[in-house]
Image: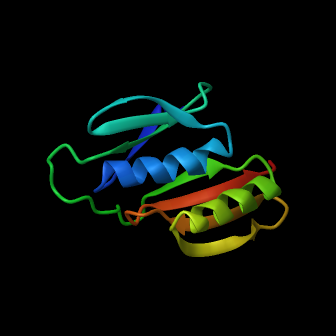
Amino acid sequence: MLGYTTIGVNDMARAEGFYNELLAGIGGKQLFGQDRIKFYGTGEGGMLAICIPYDEQTQHPGNGTMVAIPGGDRAGVDALYAKALELGASDEGEPGERVPGVFYGAYVRDLDGNKLCFFEMTM
């Protein structure tokens, strides 16, 4: 249903390093881009884009905005969470069941404060 989601970053090189390594673990890679925007995906379905804001003002994470990235299974969620922390992300909620038997998730903030959720949904 979604084509892509865009999140703002302040330092493109730093953000690229973070997302290149983080998304590689689930088969994601940078598919294309220009100086101020880069698109990541697997070639199947939606994409995540990182960009320097068009108005060239400082990036600010959206209050209530979060990007959810499928981990595949619980081990995948745990691995993405650990990798994000290793790459400098901050913890926003350790891996665990949020809706018993239905939703398992973990939460971090990337290097620019954008909130990410890694999840497994079984319904």
Q: Position of residue 90 (x, y in %)?
A: 51, 73
* Vertical order, 108 against 66 (above or below): below
Q: Position of residue 36 (x, y in %)?
A: 27, 39
Q: Would you say 16 lies left or right of 53 here?
A: right
Name the residue rendered at 66%, 37% in the picture. 27
Q: Would you say 57 lies left or right of 70 here?
A: left
The answer to which image quadrant residue 49 occupies is top left
Q: Would you say 97 lies left or right of 26 here?
A: right
Name the residue rendered at 74%, 53% in the picture. 120
Which residue is at the front of the view, 79 or 55? 79
Name the residue rendered at 14%, 47% in the picture. 55
Which residue is at the front of the view, 2 or 34? 34
State the colouring used for the structure image.
rainbow
Farthest right residue in view = 101
* Vertical order, 51 against 99 (above or below): above
Q: Would you say 106 lies left or right of 97 here?
A: left
* Vertical order, 110 against 68 (above or below): below
Q: Position of residue 40 (x, y in %)?
A: 50, 36
Which residue is at the front of the view, 26 or 115? 26
The answer to which image quadrant residue 41 occupies is top right
Q: Position of residue 25 (x, y in %)?
A: 68, 46
Name the residue rendered at 32%, 37% in the picture. 37
